[in-house]
Image (cartoon, grey):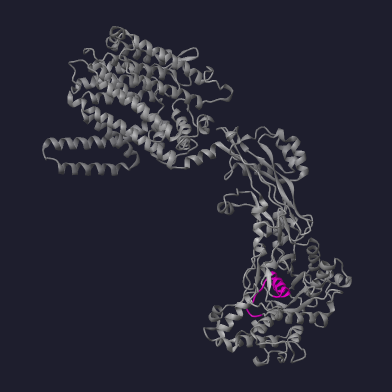
Amino acid sequence: MRSKSNNSIFHNIDWITVLTYLVLVLMGWLNIYAAVYNEEHHVITDISQKYGKQLIWISTSLLIALIILIIDENFYTAFAYFIFGAILLANITVPFLGREVKGSRSWFRFGDFGIQPAEFMKFAANLALAKFLSNQNIKIADYKNTFISLLIIGIPLIIIKVLQDETGLAIVFVAFIFTLYREGLSVNYLLLGFLAIILFVLALLINNLYLFIIIAALCTVAFLFVKRNRKNLFIIAAVGLIACSMVRGTSAVYEHMEDHQKVRIDVLLGRGTVDLKKEGYNVNQAKIAIGSGGFFGKGYLQGTQTKYDFVPEQDTDFIFCTVGEEWGFLGSSLVIILELFLIIRIIFMAERQRSPFSRIYGYGVASILFFHLTVNVGMTIGLAPVIGIPLPFFSYGGSSLWSFTILLFIFIKLDSHRLQILR
Amino acid sequence: MNQLSERKYIIIGVFILVGLIYISRLFYIQVLDDSYKLDAQNQAFRYTTEFPIRGYIYDRNNKLLVYNEAAYDLMVLPKNVKNIDTMDLCSLLGITKEQFLKKMKKATQSPNSPRKESIFEKQLSPKDYASLQERLYSFPGFWVQSRTLRKYPKKIAAHMLGYIGEADKRITEKNPYYKEGDYLGISGIEKTYEKVLRGKKGMHIIMKDVNNRDMGSYMNGLYDTAAISGLPLTTTIDADLQEYAEQLMQNKIGSVVAIDPSTGEILAIVTSPTYDPNLFVGRARNKNFVELSLDSIGKPLFNRSTMASYPPGSTFKLIMALIGLNEGVLTPETRYPCARGYPPLGGRPKCHAHPSPQNLEGAIGTSCNSYFSFVFKSVIDDKKYHDTYKAYANWRDIATSFCLGTKTGSDLAHELRGNVPSINYYDKVFGKGSWKASTVISLGIGQAEMGITPLQNANLVAIIANKGWYYTPHIVKAINNNANDTILDRFKVKHYTKIKDTAIYNMVIAGMAKAVEGGTASALKIEGIPYCAKTGTAQNPHGKDHSVFVCFAPKDNPKIAIGILIENAGFGSTYAGPIARLMMEKYLKGKITRPDLEKRMLETDLIHKGKNEVKK
């Protein structure tokens, strides 16, 4: 009995995670159907429509999941760097070898279907990071190791941003900061990052001169309250200087941004006058769709804002609008709770791993999912800038669904061998 | 390592915190804040209105007074206007290219917009519509919306019927039922019975997509409503009498109100000069409105019958007599002297030459100012009240119970209250305690500050005819052929005055009968119908006295009470009396036995001086 179940690929699988995954995927599919609902093609499996295509993506994802579970778990540790290198190469070459589609240079096309290698960079970078940090001789507090970790994250980020011009796909790599933090990265980095975000926002909203005065005042006050020695003075002065240079840097960064990005930030912060017919259109329409759902929603397939194309990208990046409009507060908070449940379940699983590699990889999965959830839902309800990234398991799209499936199921596979010795 | 694993709590904490913030935010925009729901409806729904048919209006004998005629508004949605033959459309509408461009500009610019439908050309004539209809398919973005216009086959009772107009912003803000451009009653019974006449608009919700294409009915029409037609009104007006009275009153300034005293039903209500109600319909409306409002002499838009306040004059002497008799300070045989005026105040108020002294009957017949000044003084100085002010309060109390100084509560739009001065008022004018009967003596003859509308005047006659009670005068008899509609209940309540003794009324009525038999109205007898009347003149500061005549007929079981006033026309028996007499005969007999009198009245022109002036 025991030996039989040991041999089964489903042995020790965390079914709660798998089930949550399946529920989310199914809900996503139903909502894609609603978002692009078309009276003439009302069969949900009609593959001329996006919901029919999504069914193909779902079934192939399940196939991929099965293959991942079949492959020996040691494959992922052994080939972590190789996979990372290979996919990085694909990302470097895609702008030159891929076919340009609607101005985007991040796709490999195979007839009707397309693959976005950037999507697969996530799990590859996660594997590489886990491999590097799980090395027993590695202490992350070591600056050299911090630097290498940041390279593993930063190289894909820069390649995807610079070569492919896919801000959304690139910025996701920032999520690994959570992994690094869990593995011992000084909290100062996080605080510094947090400070940077706050100062960036403030610098755009408040006259910079006032901001300098406020920083100086805060430093002075801080100095009065700590032990007056040379070290503290140095630290406070350094923080103050960094803060001031961040403020100065903000306008440089902002001016350097592309117009549509500036506008998105302006819309989020409510700077200046936002024309709801132009730059403010997406977010406003998203809010209208979600807000008009009310507590119980308008009912499945009854959403007018999403069904009649008021909301752009409603099947992909703005899929949450369909949920909000048709399923109301009940449905949309359920989706958030389900996604968060999955993420926290993954953290819980990561913490039960004996192998640091599995744990680190698990944190990577949770971090990436969380980042996607936060930004994707946040932009539809006006709490985050508009960045084109999908809602995990929900949004239409083969590459993203495959990518999330691979990301998750490698971890499920690793978890099913959690009792094994350190790798 | 252990310390690091503690960090999972911070990470989980951050994740949950973000989740909570998002769920709270969702709760705010989805449950607490309604503005997004409204935005969504405004965007995705097109509400098409089905306009109900406005209720018809009939006279008491079911003769049609107001009906509807179809009209067609040419609508435009500028966004959808593409590749049209502009010249072709212009020639069909009979407009120039410049006008066309101007109209397009108006439809495109704020408050309109290319994505918003608006009226391009209002109320096409049936002929234009017919020729346009065939070609409409070649003008995408244009379509025709049918509306109804009021039509008046008899061209009478313009002021009473009132007119309808378009709802403006002020109205839509006050009453959300109306949308800008909807028609609603602005005056007359079109206004007072607006809710009955208008019916209920139907609403169809059409879903539209982002490109403004129709996507079908929302929820298969679950929330759609059909229009409910307005209800027909049966008025109390006798169209023939109304028309006749208007003809008699033409070229005279004034008002006639005829009431059936037994029911309070208004049989005719004429304001002169009047106008053809059809002038306020259709595209010439604004032009006609301006023309009528420019007539500063006749003021045809001024609804004198309920909005003009005249001194009641001689009519009030009847009330004065009733009060005197009721208070016991006067008997039919009481005689007072007259010296071409009221002797105690040196001949003021003035009076005209007549035998003196005379009794009550004689005083009513000759309308003696001195006599009723004496009566007024005796009422105010009545010892049983010990106090002038208490006596005055009592006098005023009784006078106002005849529906003076207060709106009658009729269903005619816009009524004036009239005025019976209060103690407070005189205290303010003369100082508290420093006025007495002789200070305000001309109240006794219906002058001074007293004001009365022609409607109140006619009602006063009805009260005397009824010997002490009245029904609120009203203009609508039945709603949707139902005379028992609860809206009309208030017209079925008898109101009693403070003088209830019918014997008292009989004494005054006897005086009025005498006026017809052998008094001031003796030239106006109607064969076979004994009636009661009082001629009068009302002094006014604006020129010649107003010619006043009040009467009711027959003497017993009165069927009609008339109050008539013609501005600056002199003696009551000259113009007011003959018109009232002709109306009574017309109403009661259906034919006229004095064609000479009729001809004279029809031809009399008191407005255009120097022409057709009738010699006495």
In the displayed structure, does residue B508 sit left or right of residue A85? right
What range is drawn magenta here?
A: B447-467
Asked if residue A284 is among those painted magenta in the image, a careful observer would answer: no
Closer to the camera, B492 or B322? B492
Residue A392 relative to residue B447: left or right: left
Residue that appears at 28% across and 34% down = A196
| Residue B464 within the magenta-colored segment of the rendering | yes
Quarter occupied by residue B441? bottom right
Asked whether A259 or A380 is in front, the reply is: A380
Image quadrant containing the C terminus of chain A: top left
Q: How many marks?
A: 0
- Res A170 → quadrant: top left
Quadrant housing residue A28: top left
For residue A118, say whether it is visible: no
Spot occupied by residue A228 in the image (x, y as percentages of width and height): 11, 40
The location of residue B528, given as percent across then percent down, is 86, 74
Residue B93 image position (x, y, % from top left): 74, 42
Mostly what secondary structure, the magenta segment?
helix
Look at the image and tell me in which quarter the N terminus of chain A lies: top left
Depth check: give the residue in front, A355 or B287. A355
Q: With respect to residue B40, does B378 lie above or below?
A: below
From the viewer's perspective, tell me whether residue A171 is left or right of residue B496.
left
Q: Is residue B320 visible?
A: yes
**Rendering coords of residue B401 (x, y %):** 63, 74
